[in-house]
Image (tube, rainbow, N blue to C red):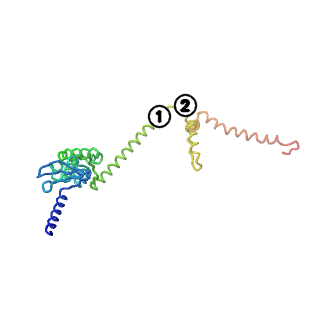
Amino acid sequence: MTAVIVVLAIILALLILLAGASIRILREYERGVVFRLGRLIDQKGPGLILLIPIIDRMARVDLRTITMNVPAQDVITRDNVTARVNAVAYFRVVDANRSVTEVENFLQATSQMAQTTLRSVLGKADLDTLLAERERLNEEIQSIIDQQTEPWGVKVTTVEIKDVEIPASMQSAMARQAEAERIRRAKVIDAEGEAQAASRLADAGDIIARNPTTLQLRYLQTLRDIGNNESTTVVFPMPMDLLEPLQKVVGQMAERREAPPEDDATPQLDAAPEGLERFDREAPERAEVRRGDDGTP
């Protein structure tokens, strides 16, 4: 009786082991690729899967999107600039059977394909293109990798360039270039503003030339704007028209000083002593006339 119980226990243990070897449970995002005696049977799952012990083998495949960091790659751009670029790739398995039968390890294969494609695509682009047109480069890299992984049952959905590292000397050169570009734009804008202002001033000058009174009104308006601040020193611009009469008088006086003496000026000077002598002779007579009746002056 004891021997029978031992045999039954052994058989029960074997049945439990066989049941454990033949039963598989797959989650919703998993699929099982079943091989029977080495031949592909079918894709199974999710849920409870029954396998024939020792005869069937199953490989689990995850159908979720996989995020893979592409290791940093040293890239030489088309304009011979060394850059270090790293990226991230998003892909998922769309055909579990081909992902197991067509490639040994689709994760490693996709990673290697992403690295080589990243170097080849970025090596054909300039540094300015690499920095300014990342979206186009991302789409190009994603398209090339997806074409290569399609036979493996892998769909690459997105490839994004995360970071671009360039030498410090190149960063300084780019900073100087950007500064020079800013200065050039500022000069061009300043010149365009001067041209527009000159055009407007020419139009204003034509209007003022037709009516000079507007210039005086403009002077007064400017003085009113300046006079709002008490600490302001006002320099009043005087029109040159007001100074023209004064300039004419000064010019006439200067001409008179520089002109030579006239001919009739000499006789007048010669006659002067005779007149003085006559005045001296008549002076005593005049003094006598001025005396009174009693003889007193």
Residue 211, x across and y down, in percent: 55, 31
- Quick check: can you spot residue 252? no
When the figure is inspected, residue 168 is found, relative to residue 200, above or below; the finding is below
Whether residue 203 is visible: yes
The 10 Å Cα crowd at callout 1, few under 14, some 14 to 19, many 20 or more, is few
Q: Where is residue 87 shown, x and y percent of the image?
A: 26, 52
Looking at the picture, tell me which residue is in the foreground, 169 or 74. Answer: 74
Amino acid, disc 1: Ala
Label 1, secondary structure: give it.
Answer: helix
Q: Please report the residue visible at 66 percent of the width from the left and 36 percent of the height from the top.
A: 271
Q: Looking at the figure, which quarter contains the C terminus?
A: top right
| Quadrant housing the N terminus | bottom left
Residue 288: give x, y in percent of width and height.
81, 42
- The residue depicted at 29 percent of the width and 45 percent of the height is 135
Indicate left or right for 71 with 182 as reference.
left
> Which label was assigned to residue 202?
1
Q: Which mark is residue 211?
A: 2
Q: In terms of image quadrants, where is residue 169?
A: bottom left
Quarter occupied by residue 250: top right
For this rendering, which residue is in front, 70 or 153? 153
Q: Secondary structure at mark 2?
A: loop
Whether the residues at callouts 1 and 2 have beta carbons within 8 Å, the answer is: no
Look at label 2 and name its amino acid: Asn
Residue 217 position (above or below residue 99): above
